[in-house]
Image (cartoon, rainbow, N blue to C red):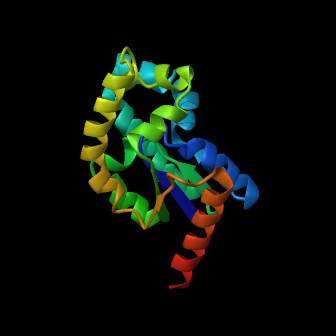
């Protein structure tokens, strides 16, 4: 079983994915980390120097490579599902889970490093960042909402979120 965690930048896909994989003995794949290792540069630098189109192609290659791993939790970059037909590809490869959080909650979770490593967040004060996230999330959310499972996690701690994801995945597999 492959579980693909999708959602907006900073919603917790990587941290939740690591915990989910550890608790349920699944391999963890972070698409951004795989790209950074393969390219020898940060995602931000790849986008800055090679362009977003090149970066999205790298994401697609890594997404297709996840098919080689049977039991895994895959944390995707925030833009991966919305590029071309990646959401359809995810649907063919496994179960998609949208980790849904408001821009306000995402902002409260972001560390200074988390803000800096995302090129689209750089140089924005809190008010500008919230405005940007509201606009950008409104563009992306129709794709995110096509996930097999949508978890609105505003009021959930990580342990509850992980348990909710696994319960919903098991229900989906039994239907």
Residue 139 image offset from top left, x and y in percent = 24, 45
Which residue does the image show at 51% across and 77% down from the upper left?
Answer: 172
Residue 18 image offset from top left, x and y in percent = 67, 47
Which residue does the image show at 47% across and 38% down from the upper left?
Answer: 106
Residue 33 image offset from top left, x and y in percent = 57, 34
In this view, 6 is above or below 103: below
Q: Quadrant of residue 98?
A: bottom left
Residue 68 image offset from top left, x and y in percent = 57, 57
User: Seen in the image, is 14 located left or right of residue 86?
Assistant: right
Q: Quadrant of residue 12?
A: top right
In this view, 58 is above or below 18: above
Q: Quadrant of residue 59?
A: top left
In this view, 161 is above or below 16: below
Which residue does the image show at 43% across and 48% down from the upper left?
Answer: 7
Q: Nearer the viewer, residue 1 or 39?
A: 1
Can residue 145 be seen here? The reply is yes
Q: Nearer the viewer, residue 157 or 86?
A: 157
Can residue 9 be seen here? The reply is no
Quadrant placement of the N terminus: bottom right
């Amino acid at each position: 079983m492959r579980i693909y965690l999708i959602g907006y930048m900073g919603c917790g896909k990587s941290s939740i994915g690591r915990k989910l994989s550890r608790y349920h003995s699944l391999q963890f794949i972070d698409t951004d980390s795989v790209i950074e290792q393969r390219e020898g540069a940060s995602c931000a630098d790849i986008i800055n120097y090679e362009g977003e189109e090149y970066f999205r192609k790298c994401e697609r290659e890594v997404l297709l490579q996840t098919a080689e791993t049977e039991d895994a939790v895959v944390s995707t970059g925030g833009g991966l599902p919305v590029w071309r037909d990646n959401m359809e590809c995810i649907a063919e490869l496994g179960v998609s889970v949208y980790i849904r959080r408001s821009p306000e909650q995402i902002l409260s979770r972001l560390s200074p490093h988390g803000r800096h490593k995302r090129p689209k967040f750089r140089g924005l004060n809190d008010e500008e960042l919230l405005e940007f996230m509201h606009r950008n999330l409104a563009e992306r959310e129709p794709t995110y909402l096509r996930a097999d499972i949508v978890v609105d996690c505003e009021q959930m701690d990580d342990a509850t979120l992980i348990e909710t994801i696994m319960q919903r995945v098991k229900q989906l597999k039994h239907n």
